[in-house]
Amino acid sequence: MKKISNEWIKDTALLFYQIFSVDYEDANFNVKLMAGGGGNSTLCSTWTQLSDDFLNYRISKKAYKLLLNLISEEDKKNIIKNEKDITIPKKIIYDKYRGLFFNNAKGVVNRKNSGKYFHFDHNPSNKKVLSLLKSKVKNEKNNPDFLIELTNYVKNVQTVDLITVEEDQIRTSADLKLKDNKMDALERDRLIKTEFYNLHII
């Protein structure tokens, strides 16, 4: 799978290089190209689908502590933690306690009323990722080793963070105030003032 993932990353880098290395004259097309929000943007959806197989996951310290308070003693025994990494079996997140992680309710109060306490957050937002990729291609596309550099950049440009709904609200509210100029990953991390562990879901 690792070999397939590495090829996938290279192909993803090549795709976005081909898109952003072109100067499009139609201003309206440029706006549509960089539009964000779920299904509102073809490129946002494309990035999500392509990156799902290679993005790194993290879990906030607060989310980890809350999870331990919400699951059974027996299930706690199946979670492995060391200094930098936490490993959680898939069945805890996707089967046994699915309601804690997945619900379409919006806002902290509505989410908690529905039983959702955690959120998987793309950090930074997919729209910000498009902006970062576009800028990197525009600024460095003439570098002869650029595709190698872009491939390495794509590997680390975004993480998927398992955070509490309160932490997600802080990030989302701050991003919404900025409209099109979304925050980068470090800015969003500083906002919620937490430590992160690498998260492995097996």
Image (cartoon, rainbow, N blue to C red):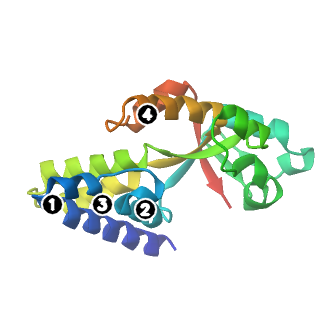
The residue that mark 1 highlights is 21
Q: At label 1, which amino acid type do we have?
A: Ser
Residue at the image point whose x is 77% and y is 43% from the top: 114
Q: Residues within 10 Å of mark 1 (few under 14, many from 20)?
A: some
Label 4 with label 2: CB-CB less than 8 Å: no
The residue that mark 2 highlights is 45
The residue that mark 3 highlights is 151
Label 3 with label 4: CB-CB less than 8 Å: no
| Nearer to us in this view, 5 or 135 | 135
Residue at the image point whose x is 67% and y is 45% from the top: 105
Whichever of callouts 2 and 1 sits on the residue coming sooner in the sequence is: 1
Left or right: residue 177 versus residue 152 is right
Left or right: residue 135 versus residue 160 is left
- Report the disc number at residue 175: 4
Whichever of callouts 4 and 2 sits on the residue coming sooner in the sequence is: 2
Up-down relation of residue 69 to residue 45 (above or below): above
Judging from the image, what secondary structure is the residue with disc 3 in? helix
Residue at the image point whose x is 44% and y is 74% from the top: 3
